[in-house]
Image: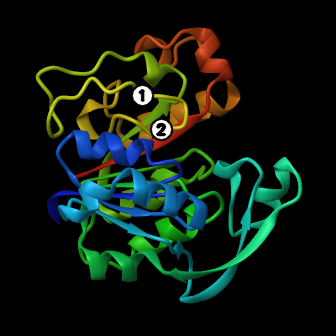
């Protein structure tokens, strides 16, 4: 594992990438949408020149090859899965090279933290981790992957969290920092945001998380870990979630 490296799978507008760079990490940012990659290359020109950031205009999927990528009118819904992208109306189709996640990590290094937000290919990415001999210290993925903890536990992940993406925008940055350098950069709704031991709330065991995730899905607020962590009921009900795992 490379201790100062983060993989941003699903770079989107670069907000998370900017956050990781501000925290002092090197970043490999993966984004299938060519428009977003061109914009990020302009925005982060100095970081790219300094070797702190690599932007890859590729997709991550179950196999190598060029595949149709559907560019949504709502750019963060663009996907290799046509039905995902078409939720916002007609799409533009472009051909994008893809690589399995395990191959990409072998080529670029096992990161300290792996963020996965790639609209529809999240499941194949998690499945690819099982082909590796070592793993990221932390992994997060959108809550569309309901069996997340059951996939991660056999790989040695023992801590789990559900992070409400409305609530984490209100959490005060930790000082002194636990992960990298301190930054008071504002977390927004398009970001995965704080990671590792700076994500809010305690790490849960497999069994605790199994109960908590069912509470989140069923929107049972009373007695939930989210309530105990200070998430207001309206954010609990209306928010969306990222799922986090911690190794060992």
Cα distance in 3D space between marks 1 and 2: 6 Å
Front residue of 27 and 44: 44
Which type of secondary structure does the marked residue at label 1 adopt?
loop
| Residue 33 in sight from this viewpoint | no
The residue wearing badge 2 is 191
Identify the residue at image location x=25%, y=46%.
21
Identify the residue at image location x=27%, y=21%.
173
Give the class, few, some or many, for how many residues have Cα within 10 Å of label 2's Cα (few <14, many ≥20).
many
Q: Which mark is residue 15?
A: none
Identify the residue at image location x=60%, y=34%.
214
Expressed as whole percent of the image width and height from the top left, the position of residue 52 reads 21, 59
| Residue 158 in sight from this viewpoint | yes
Expressed as whole percent of the image width and height from the top left, the position of residue 97 reads 56, 83
| Proximity of marks 1 and 2: CB atoms separated by less than 8 Å | yes
The residue wearing badge 1 is 187
- Whether residue 14 sits left or right of residue 23 in the image: it is right
Front residue of 137 and 103: 103
Identify the residue at image location x=35%, y=24%.
201
Which type of secondary structure does the marked residue at label 2 adopt?
loop
Front residue of 199 and 8: 8
| Total marks placed | 2
Give the class, few, some or many, for how many residues have Cα within 10 Å of label 1's Cα (few <14, many ≥20).
many
Front residue of 95 and 159: 95
- Whether residue 135 sits left or right of residue 98 in the image: it is left
Expressed as whole percent of the image width and height from the top left, the position of residue 209 reads 45, 37
Residue lying farthest bottom? 65
The vertical placement of 136 against 96, above or below, is above
Quarter of the N terminus within the rendering: bottom left
> Quadrant of residue 143 in the image?
top right
């Amino acid at each position: 594992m490379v201790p100062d490296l983060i993989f941003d799978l699903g770079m989107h507008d670069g907000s998370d990438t900017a956050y990781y760079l501000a925290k002092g990490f090197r970043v490999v940012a993966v984004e299938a949408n060519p428009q977003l990659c061109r914009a990020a290359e302009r925005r982060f020109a100095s970081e790219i020149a300094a070797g702190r950031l690599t932007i890859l205009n590729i997709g991550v999927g179950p196999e190598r090859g060029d595949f149709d990528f559907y560019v949504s009118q709502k750019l963060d819904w663009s996907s290799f899965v046509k039905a995902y992208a078409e939720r916002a109306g007609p799409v533009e189709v472009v051909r994008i090279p893809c690589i399995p996640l395990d191959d990409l990590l072998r080529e670029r290094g096992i990161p300290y933290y792996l963020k996965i937000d790639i609209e529809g290919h999240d499941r194949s990415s998690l499945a690819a981790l099982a082909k590796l001999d070592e793993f990221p210290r932390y992994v997060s993925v959108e809550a569309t992957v309901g069996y997340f903890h059951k996939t991660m536990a056999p790989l040695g992940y023992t801590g789990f969290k559900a992070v409400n993406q409305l609530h984490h925008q209100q959490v005060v940055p930790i000082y002194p920092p636990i992960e990298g350098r301190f930054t008071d950069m504002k977390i927004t709704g398009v970001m995965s945001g704080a990671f590792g031991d700076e994500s809010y709330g305690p790490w849960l065991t497999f069994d605790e998380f199994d109960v908590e995730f069912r509470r989140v899905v069923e929107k049972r607020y009373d007695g939930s870990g989210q309530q105990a962590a200070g998430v207001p009921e309206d954010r609990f009900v209306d928010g969306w979630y990222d799922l986090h795992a911690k190794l060992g």
